Amino acid sequence: MSCLVSFCLSLWLAASPVRTSAPDEDISVLALLPRNNSYIFSISRVSPAIEYARRRLESPGLRFSVDYADSNCHNDALFALVDRAMGGRTPDLLLGPVCEYAASQVVRLASHWNIPVVSAGALASGFSLMRSEYTHLTRVAPTYLKMGETFYAMFEYFGWKKALLVFDDDKEERNCFFTIEGVHNVLIEQHHIEHLSINSKEFKVDLDEIMKFVQDSEVIIMCAGADIVREIMLAAHRRKLTNGRYIFFNIELFNSSLYGDGSWYRGDKYDSDAKHAYASLNTMTLLRSVKPEFENFTMELRKSNKKTGLHNGNFENVNMFMEGFHDALVLYTIALEEARKSGYTKKDGDQITQRMWNRSFEGIAGQVNIDVNGERYGDFSVMAMTDYDAGTYETVINYFGINESLQLLPGFNSDRFSLHGRVRTPEPLPDDPCGLGVSAVTGIIVGALLGTALLMAFYFFRKNYRITIERRTQREECNMGKHRQLREDSIRSNFSAA
Ligand SMILES: *[C@@H]1O[C@H](CO)[C@@H](O)[C@H](O)[C@H]1NC(C)=O
Ligand SMILES: *[C@@H]1O[C@H](CO)[C@@H](O)[C@H](O)[C@H]1NC(C)=O
Ligand SMILES: *[C@@H]1O[C@H](CO)[C@@H](O)[C@H](O)[C@H]1NC(C)=O
Ligand SMILES: *[C@@H]1O[C@H](CO)[C@@H](O)[C@H](O)[C@H]1NC(C)=O
Ligand SMILES: *[C@@H]1O[C@H](CO)[C@@H](O)[C@H](O)[C@H]1NC(C)=O
């Protein structure tokens, strides 16, 4: 009998890994972020923002104990969670991870253990497309798919049809791969898309090859380091492709010191050419709003960063991750209070998660709107050169995700967004997009396609090929979708593990 009891007890223990003995008002939070300060979402950058939120949210009925663990942007995030659970310290809430591969493992396990995960990262499309595996994930920063919608809105508004997507794939964290995947998934349904993958870490960038593709396209969308973007723009300028016949974009969402003024400047002999070339280059960024309270937040964060010696002379701006993780704790608290009123506790992760979705709340910088899938509606800005002599940039277009509308600002010059000197031969678009929406079919196979192509390029053309090229019509994409063995989401096609 006692044997049976202890058997049952051990079963109960095994089956409920999320139970801890802490009272309901003590919320144990595990923040999974990299310790390495080369990440703009490192623990020392983001923790002051979380602490700021914690101080303001705590009340007699609510305390947070926040524990920080080094995700190392990879497996360590999962290990940190498992180690805590094994030690009987399973958290009630996870903040982060940001890196896609770290997040995909952690979120799967947390969803299984009924722990809510709120992140200002995990922006890849795979998290939306495979919702059933990531049921407990709420994203408080706009995802790459939402960014793709901004491009979609512009393509519609300006009547662009063809896009060339160029991305630098490091095959490790693959930020540019996931960024461009978001654009691809949204545009592919109604536009002619090609993509080029480069790997500047391993190979010299083949500018001639890229230019051949540029000539065939209309709108070139790039995700790469600032130096690579400059090389590409200079190459385009040398070939007279910056004459208005093509429109160039680079995507730079997070590090605000990288976009805008002076991004063309290097103090070398190409500066003048680069300035001319950049008159055709627009930058896609996050729309940042500020309200009075944000000032105090910024000051407090700067004070903390000064203490940790993070800033080197000039202060860093508050970035989306700092803002996002602050708002993550705010959102969680709203949902927790609501769940408690309905008789649930902090252990009802699914109930709390549901209450974070489909709602709007006041974040530190302005209103935050979360959609019915737990993803933040994205607001984005396009910056363009407005003073061609000085080479300075301004925001010219804003996009609001909540009402899907574009806002043209005073600096906007329609000439710079029109394709010049083109005789348009109408391209027949497939009338039957194989019966399924973009997210259902193309989304799932894109990751696999990109992954497969990269794999092939890597193994077969290792010696002499520098870029991977994909030309695919929508019809082919549809046919590919029928091969079920290709069903793989973008997160699983982890090239570095291959
Ligand atoms: C931090 O990351 C950078 C860039 O990935 C790397 O070069 C450096 O060695 C890392 N530092 C530590 C302490 O791991
Ligand atoms: C952001 O970009 C600037 C300009 O290139 C660079 O100096 C800085 O190190 C970047 N910050 C981070 C955290 O990557
Ligand atoms: C921010 O506000 C708090 C109180 O609301 C105040 O104690 C603190 O000094 C302010 N910080 C700065 C840097 O103004
Ligand atoms: C989202 O919230 C609105 C009201 O705020 C409600 O009418 C709608 O039914 C909700 N949608 C879902 C899917 O829960
Ligand atoms: C869309 O929403 C934004 C932000 O809430 C607002 O400023 C803008 O006027 C709205 N646009 C339209 C067309 O409703």
Image: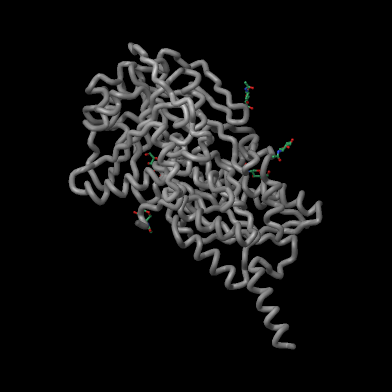
With 152 as the anchor, is 28 left or right in this view? Answer: right
Task: Measuring from the top left, give residue 1's x and y in whole percent.
Answer: 74, 88
Q: Is residue 427 visible?
A: yes
Q: Nearer the viewer, residue 55 or 100?
A: 100
Foreground pick, 400 / 15: 15
Image quarter where the C terminus lies is bottom left
Whether residue 307 is visible to the viewer of this picture, yes or no, is no
Q: What is the count of numbered marks?
A: 0
Q: Nearer the viewer, residue 278 or 211?
A: 211
- Give the side of residue 259 with respect to residue 32, left or right: left
Q: How is the image coloured?
A: one colour
Residue 454 locus on image (x, y percent)? 32, 46
Above or below, 456 relative to 209: below
Point out the quarter of the image occupied by ligand 2. Answer: top left
Eyeballing the image, is 89 above or below 134? below
Give percent across and percent down for residue 405.
Answer: 58, 23
Q: Position of residue 150 (x, y in %)?
A: 51, 29
Residue ID at (48%, 40%):
443
